[in-house]
Image: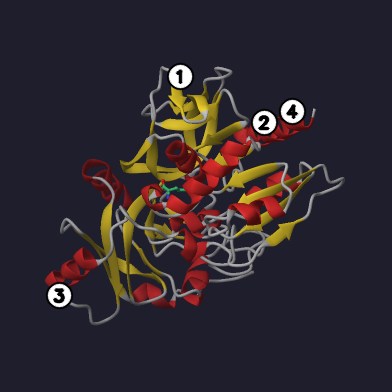
Amino acid sequence: MTTSTRGAARVPAVLVLEDGRIFRGRAYGAVGETFGEAVFSTGMTGYQETLTDPSYHRQVVVMTAPHVGNTGVNDEDAESARIWVSGYVVRDPARVPSSWRSRRTLDEELAAQGVVGISGVDTRALTRHLRERGAMRVGIFSGNALPDEGTMLAEVRQAPEMTGADLSAEVATTETYVVPAQGQKKFTVAAVDLGIKGMTPYRMAERGIEVHVLPATASVEEVYAVNPDGVFFSNGPGDPATADHPVALMRAVLERGTPLFGICFGNQILGRALGFGTYKLKYGHRGINQPVQDRTTGKVEVTAHNHGFAVDAPLDTVADTPFGRAEVSHVCLNDNVVEGLQLLDKPAFSVQYHPEAAAGPHDAAYLFDRFVSLMEGQRA
Ligand SMILES: NC(=O)CC[C@H](N)C(=O)O
């Protein structure tokens, strides 16, 4: 059993929002200072997957679940090789984790990876504030001698904004690697890594797909050098309005008519490739309990989300695009945000949420089967 050292718990910490609101608490994880965009996640569980999701790069994640760290940190559930959140905000951290898989406490893991957090925060009040005012920049400062409030606020206001941030290259692989198909190999997919989560190639591999994960900077030639049956565009951090290279790459794939699937950032890139705009949501969707309707079947699914931007596409008309007709295939039932796109004249579709479900319910796993069907259709 692992027990927490809880050494940092006696050190004071302050959370300073860019609009001047301040929350006081205690250090959690590493002691120091950090900056990012304050966002909240409504997942009751799955914190290890959240922390290691590269799409959270440069974001300070506020957990709305009041009790965090209960199952410690294990060696199996990370979605990438490191924690990507720039800061972590919790109300009441577990004092002693309890799970047969736990190897370390969350407090220890955050400290070991140098991630500055804060505990003892009224996360309900903070979340309500972010819902009212929108996601904004934030700083966490911990230590026994903290700067005065004016100095901290000035530092927060100097931190970079999420709008206009081009971050994929900071998180994506620089070398191509292959995730082998499980069982008999049926298809080859070129997956463009914009910040991919580990579960995504795994979901393809378990369907007989050999996945070649390529850097975000991959050229059209590099994509087609693997002789793909399908091309995949991953999730990733940052503002999709900056993703000009992936948009150009995707247009080349659409031109050739290769089956195409995109998740999250990949959905925003498909939106842009088709000529739609993207925009920043007031406070985004993050968590594992978001209702989405698949308009192609009418079915409602409960899904995992992590997005701060969305595609601006017409909800009720079929759009004419440079690649033929396109429609909104999925919509969020909370706020009517576009959650999926599909082309009617080409084998291409995408969703704004996370069918790989890490963490989250498995309702949307059928989307990987849809991708397989597109590749089968292309061979027939
Ligand atoms: N998970 C993702 O791919 C997020 C996409 C994009 N960075 C957003 O916040 O909307």
Q: Is mark 3 within 8 Å of ligand 1?
A: no
Q: Earlier in the sequence, mark 2 or mark 4?
A: 2
- Asked which secondary structure carries label 1, the reply is loop
Q: Earlier in the sequence, mark 1 or mark 2?
A: 1
Disc 4 from disc 1: Cα separation: 23 Å
Q: Which mark is residue 370?
A: 2
Q: Relative to 277, does residue 249 appear above or below in the rendering? A: below
Name the kind of residue labelled 4 in the image: Gly
Q: Is mark 4 within 8 Å of ligand 1?
A: no
Q: Pinpoint residue 350: horizontal percent, then vertical percent.
A: 54, 36
Q: Relative to 266, does residue 178 appear above or below in the rendering? A: below
Residue in front for this viewpoint, 36 or 258:
258
Disc 4 packing (10 Å; few <14; some 14–19; many ≥20): few
- Asked which secondary structure carries label 4, the reply is helix
Q: Earlier in the sequence, mark 1 or mark 3?
A: 3
Answer with left or right where residue 41 lies relative to residue 201. left
Instruction: State how many labels appear.
Output: 4
Mark 2 vs mark 3: in front: 2
- Asked which secondary structure carries label 3, the reply is loop
